[in-house]
Image: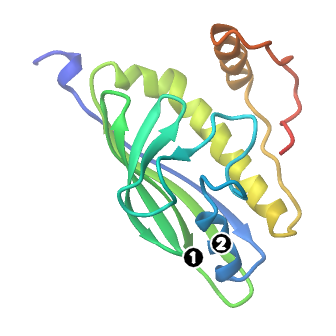
């Protein structure tokens, strides 16, 4: 055995939400990502920002997560290729799937391999925060389309991580409550 740093972890992480809206309306949520009128990315999280409007080749990220827009089909899907943090090799994407004229499913998917320290940082830090952020985004998608919003409460661990990160950033820490934050 060559050591734990060389053993990769294959990660597939999928979040989906049924939306009662046409695929075109749901696709406009994806198209709004990183714009001044972003209807999908939840407030209260590090902002998704790109160095130019959403299109192939745009670079950016949110917080310490860095990526490039690898593919973009307006009104349907966007895929981002990870460029950081170190040890994240793969992509994440938003896509409108399983569509009919009256409803569709909005999906966020990560497919990546974690290596080295990313094996532990994914499990302990990034995954719980990612899962909470994406569930907040899907709740915001519902609200943006006039659907009944289904909030998923943050776990106690996510609340502790957010409190610790706020303290490290020098920001006033938000109280740790059982309520999901509003967007």
Q: Name the residue that disc number 2 marks.
A: 28
Regarding mark 1 in the picture, which secondary structure is present there? loop
Q: Name the residue that disc number 1 marks.
A: 75
Label 1 Cα crowd, 10 Å radius (few <14 / some 14-19 / many 20+)? some
> What's the residue at 44%, 22% (across, down)?
121
In front of the other: 15 or 143: 143
Q: On the picture, is 41 further left or further right than 71?
A: right
Q: On the picture, is 174 further left or further right than 56?
A: right
Label 2 Cα crowd, 10 Å radius (few <14 / some 14-19 / many 20+)? some
> What's the residue at 44%, 63% (across, down)?
55
Contact, mark 2 vs mark 1 (Cβ under 8 Å): yes
Using the image, determine if residue 79 lies above or below residue 11.
below
Query: Label 2, label 1: how many angstroms apart (C-alpha)?
Result: 5 Å
Quarter of the image with the C terminus in it: top right
Query: Measured from the top left, where is residue 182 in percent x and y?
Result: 87, 42
Q: Residue furthest bottom?
A: 101
Q: Residue furthest left?
A: 2
Query: Measured from the top left, where is residue 59 in percent x and y?
Result: 41, 47
């Amino acid at each position: 055995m060559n050591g734990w740093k060389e053993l990769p972890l294959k990660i597939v992480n999928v979040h989906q939400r049924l939306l009662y809206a046409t695929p075109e309306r749901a696709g406009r949520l994806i198209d709004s990502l990183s714009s001044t009128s972003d209807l999908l990315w939840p407030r209260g999280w590090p902002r998704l920002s790109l160095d130019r409007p959403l299109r192939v080749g745009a670079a950016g990220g949110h917080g310490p997560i860095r990526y490039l827009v690898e593919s973009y089909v307006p009104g349907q899907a966007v895929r981002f290729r990870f460029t950081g943090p170190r040890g994240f090799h793969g992509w994440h994407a938003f896509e409108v799937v399983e569509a009919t004229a009256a409803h569709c499913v909005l999906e966020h998917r990560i497919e990546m391999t974690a290596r080295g320290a990313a094996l532990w940082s994914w499990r302990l830090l990034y995954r719980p925060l990612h899962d909470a952020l994406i569930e907040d985004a899907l709740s915001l998608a519902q609200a943006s389309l006039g659907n009944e919003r289904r909030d998923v409460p943050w776990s106690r661990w996510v609340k502790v991580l957010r409190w610790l990160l706020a303290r490290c950033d020098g920001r006033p820490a938000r109280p740790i409550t059982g309520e999901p934050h509003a967007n």
